[in-house]
Image (cartoon, rainbow, N blue to C red):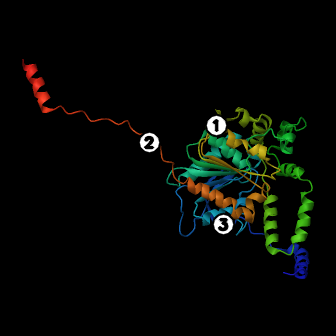
């Protein structure tokens, strides 16, 4: 396309932006297989030729974001791509907490809700286990659960999941400051409003709105770009409030006490020890992630007890590196291959048995001689 044609289309698209159809998001066909309170578990319909693997996959998005970031739009959907590769894919939709959920605890979500999602997904596989993938805060929840309830987890994959909270990132510094009055905020609001949390994320990159506007004007001639941009903006402005008591525990036990690193955090009264995670584990970190810095996510691999573990460090930011077309062509095939390699239980090592020599047979002459002596 010539520069003149691009310029003409750019202005036509900019002038018609108000009338532009809303983007289609979360379109991969799925069915609700479990529902409880506000959350539900979705199972994406398998491809026509059926699933290719014994072990299903459970996707756990962040508690404060809509699940369809992993099913953004046709042709740019992680769920769609995994189904096409033959995986049986489940995803947690956390729903929207109401005022009555202000007392919902961190344990109820991480042990109760997530535990039931894992068990339901595991029932669909031949091993009674499921691969678990957690993204951002969803990854932290998955890590905490795996350290205490590993029975139905075949492998653990985490994307940009914080586990060490005493880093130098702005979110960590802010939540540990004396001016962050956690109790007063929760007492006043019940559930922590999504607008407050969105404002905190925007604080990390205050010039981002201007950068986005400039980028849209520059690329407005590209309809495919605009479709993807507005789909992502739809998700980015469709946030979820954080249940108050769960948020209190999250900030006090993780951000302020750094409970996973100091081994002081518990789940339903049981200690959460990262060294107890022995399943195959893959951790992905991103070089330009301003929400979960590398130093917050990387220690997981160092601390867990698994001998089958790997960390992949990639360029890109917290969201773009996960849902971009490049990610669909590189990151997700890598994760799919990881799951394929761990689709069956590892064969148990069989120790060689000590060789037992057969009993020596006595010679007939010696046997007769001993019998004659005994008779005398």
Query: Which residue corresponds to mark 1?
Result: 275
Label 3 element class:
loop
Distance (Cα) linking label 1 and label 2: 25 Å
User: Residue 334, image x and y in percent?
Assistant: 65, 58
Label 2 element class:
loop
Front in this rendered view, residue 234 or 177: 177
Label 1 element class:
helix
Name above or below for residue 197 compared with residue 182. Answer: below
**In terms of sequence position, does the residue under pointer 1 or pointer 2 come before the other?**
1
Nearest-to-viewer mark from 3 and 2: 2
The answer to whether residue 42 is seen in the rendering is no
Q: Quadrant of the C terminus?
A: top left
**In terms of sequence position, does the residue under pointer 1 or pointer 3 come before the other?**
3
In the picture, residue 220 is in which quadrant? bottom right
Query: Which residue corresponds to mark 2?
Result: 350
The answer to whether residue 214 is seen in the rendering is yes
Left or right: 126 in relation to 376: right
Who's the residue at 80% across and 35% down the image? 256
Mark 2 burial class by Cα count in 10 Å: few <14, some 14-19, many 20+: few
Who's the residue at 79% across and 45% down the image? 191
User: Residue 299, image x and y in percent?
Assistant: 72, 41
Query: Which residue corresponds to mark 3?
Result: 28
**In terms of sequence position, does the residue under pointer 3 or pointer 2 come before the other?**
3
User: Residue 354, image x and y in percent?
Assistant: 37, 35
Q: Are marks 1 and 2 in contact (CB under 8 Å)?
A: no
Q: Are marks 3 and 2 in contact (CB under 8 Å)?
A: no
Mark 1 burial class by Cα count in 10 Å: few <14, some 14-19, many 20+: some
Mark 3 burial class by Cα count in 10 Å: few <14, some 14-19, many 20+: some
């Amino acid at each position: 396309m010539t520069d003149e044609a691009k310029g003409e289309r750019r202005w036509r698209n900019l002038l018609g932006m108000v009338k532009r159809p809303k983007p289609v998001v979360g379109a991969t066909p799925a069915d609700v297989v479990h529902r409880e309170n506000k959350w539900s578990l979705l199972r994406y319909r398998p491809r026509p030729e059926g699933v290719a693997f014994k072990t299903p996959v459970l996707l756990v998005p962040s508690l404060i974001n809509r699940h369809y970031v992993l099913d953004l739009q046709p042709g740019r959907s992680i769920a769609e791509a995994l189904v096409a590769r033959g995986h049986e894919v489940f995803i947690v939709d956390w729903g929207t907490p109401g005022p009555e959920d202000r007392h919902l605890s961190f344990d109820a979500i991480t042990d109760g809700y997530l535990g039931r999602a894992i068990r339901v997904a595991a029932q669909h596989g031949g091993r009674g286990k499921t691969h678990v993938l957690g993204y951002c805060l969803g990854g932290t929840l998955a890590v905490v659960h795996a350290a205490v309830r590993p029975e139905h987890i075949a492998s653990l994959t985490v994307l940009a999941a914080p586990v060490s909270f005493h880093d130098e990132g702005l979110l960590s510094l802010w939540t540990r400051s004396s001016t962050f009055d956690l109790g007063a905020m929760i007492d006043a609001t019940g559930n922590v409003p999504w607008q407050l949390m969105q404002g905190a994320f925007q604080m990390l990159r205050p010039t981002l709105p201007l950068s986005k506007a400039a980028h849209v004007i520059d690329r407005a001639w590209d309809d495919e770009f605009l479709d993807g941009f507005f789909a992502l903006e739809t998700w980015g402005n469709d946030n979820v409030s954080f249940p108050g008591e769960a948020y209190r525990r999250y900030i006090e036990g993780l951000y302020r006490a750094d409970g996973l690193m100091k081994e002081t955090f518990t789940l339903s009264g049981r200690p959460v020890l990262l060294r107890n995670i022995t399943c195959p584990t893959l951790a992905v970190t991103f070089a330009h992630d301003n929400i979960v810095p590398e130093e917050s996510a990387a220690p997981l691999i160092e601390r867990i007890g698994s001998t089958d573990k790997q960390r992949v460090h990639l360029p890109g930011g917290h969201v773009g590196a996960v849902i971009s077309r490049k990610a669909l062509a590189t990151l997700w095939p890598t994760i799919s291959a990881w799951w394929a390699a761990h689709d069956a239980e590892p064969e148990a090592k069989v120790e060689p048995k000590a060789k037992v020599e057969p009993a020596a047979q006595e010679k007939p002459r010696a046997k007769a001689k001993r019998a004659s002596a005994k008779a005398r």
